[in-house]
Image: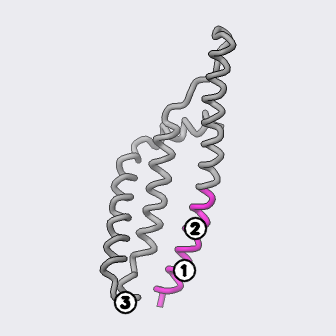
Amino acid sequence: MIDKLHKVAQAIQILRLPSIAVGIIGLASAVIIIFNSTSHEDDLLLIPSIVALLWAISTYYFIVTFRSIPKKPNKSLNFLANFKQNVRRGWYWFIGIIFLGTTLATMSLSYRMTSIWLKDYSD
């Protein structure tokens, strides 16, 4: 699994800087809207900016975490070196499972927030 995540992270490496830019824009717009909003109509872009911030953080975290992973241990290493390598790879497996869970949570939250936003502002 972590090898596949590594390949995907390498393939989308070019999105690292754009995700930072989208995150900064999303955070800045959310903060500005929260502190300058005087009515419900002024909050029009609050939910989209929060959703953009969530996906930007998720994308950046994914790319940075999985762009380099420990190699599979080989037979030429001694027991202790193999054990260390397996522990490091196990940590990445754990982080990969956590990341998949947070991705599902982000998808669910994005769906809910977008549906609320569309319901509130589609009229």
> Which is more toward the observer, 119 or 36?
36
Tell me residue 64's x, y (percent). Answer: 46, 41
Q: Nearer the viewer, mark 1 or mark 3?
A: 3
Does the residue at mark 1 contact the one at mark 2 (Cβ under 8 Å)? no
Callout 2 amino acid? Leu
First reached walking from the N terminus: tag 1 or tag 3: 3
Q: Residue at x 64, y 53 (%)?
A: 101
Disc ID at residue 109: 2
Say which quadrant the N terminus sits in: top right
Q: Which mark is residue 116?
A: 1
For residue 39, the mark is 3
Q: Earlier in the sequence, mark 3 or mark 2?
A: 3
Instruction: Name which residue type carries label 3.
Output: Ser
Check disc 1 and give the amino acid type: Ile
**Earlier along the polypeptide chain: callout 1 or callout 2?**
2
Q: Nearer the viewer, mark 3 or mark 2?
A: 3
87 left or right, relative to 55: right
